[in-house]
Amino acid sequence: MAAKMTYEAGMQELEELVSRLESGDMPLEESFKAFEKGMKLSEKLKKMLDDTDARVLELTENGQRPLDPEEDV
């Protein structure tokens, strides 16, 4: 079973894919596969952000007040 990817690790992988694509050194088929992987990774990262946003809203009384990092828990 694969380990759960962190947002930071996913962003790093996406940045590496983009860099490789921008270099123009990959054959067309490899570029297409990298692009497809990057799109899937981008969707997964967006879902991670959306899920985190939903959790923050829930924790801050449905978004009625900002989350204060200085406030004691």
Image (cartoon, grey):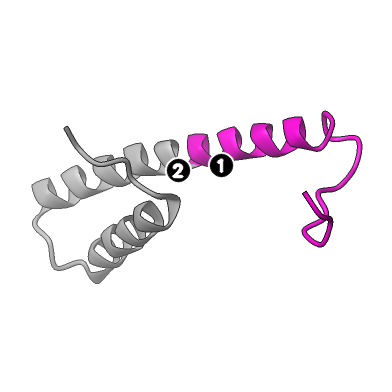
Q: Where residue 25 sits: x, y (%)?
A: 14, 68
Span shown in magenta = 46-73
Going by the numbered disc 2, the residue's amino acid type is: Leu
Residue drawn at (33%, 37%), measured in percent from left and top?
A: 40
Q: Position of residue 56 (x, y in %)?
A: 71, 39
Q: Is residue 10 above or below residue 40?
A: below
- Could you tell me which secondary element the residue under label 1 belongs to? helix
Residue 7 covered by magenta stretch: no
Name the image quarter holding the N terminus. top left
* Residue 69 shown left or right of residue 52 in the figure: right
Where's residue 55, x and y in %?
66, 34
Left or right position of 47 against 5: right
Furthest-front residue in this view: 73
**Alpha-carbon neighbours of circle 1 within 10 Å: few (<14), some, or many (≥20)?**
few
Nearest the eye: 11 or 36:
11
Q: Amino acid at mark 1?
A: Leu
Disc 2/disc 1 C-alpha distance (Å): 6 Å
Q: Which mark is residue 59?
A: none
In the image: residue 47, left or right of residue 64: left
Q: Are marks 2 and 1 in contact (CB under 8 Å)?
A: yes
Image-quadrant location for residue 9: bottom left
Q: Which of 20 and 73 lies nearest the eye of the viewer?
A: 73
Residue 60 shown in magenta: yes
Q: In the picture, residue 51 is in which quadrant?
A: top right
Identify the residue under disc 1: 49
Expressed as whole percent of the image width and height from the top left, the position of residue 18 reads 32, 60
Secondary structure of the residue carrying numbered label 2: helix
Task: Indicate whether 9 appears above or below 65.
Answer: below
Give the residue number, with chain letter if any, for mark 2: 45
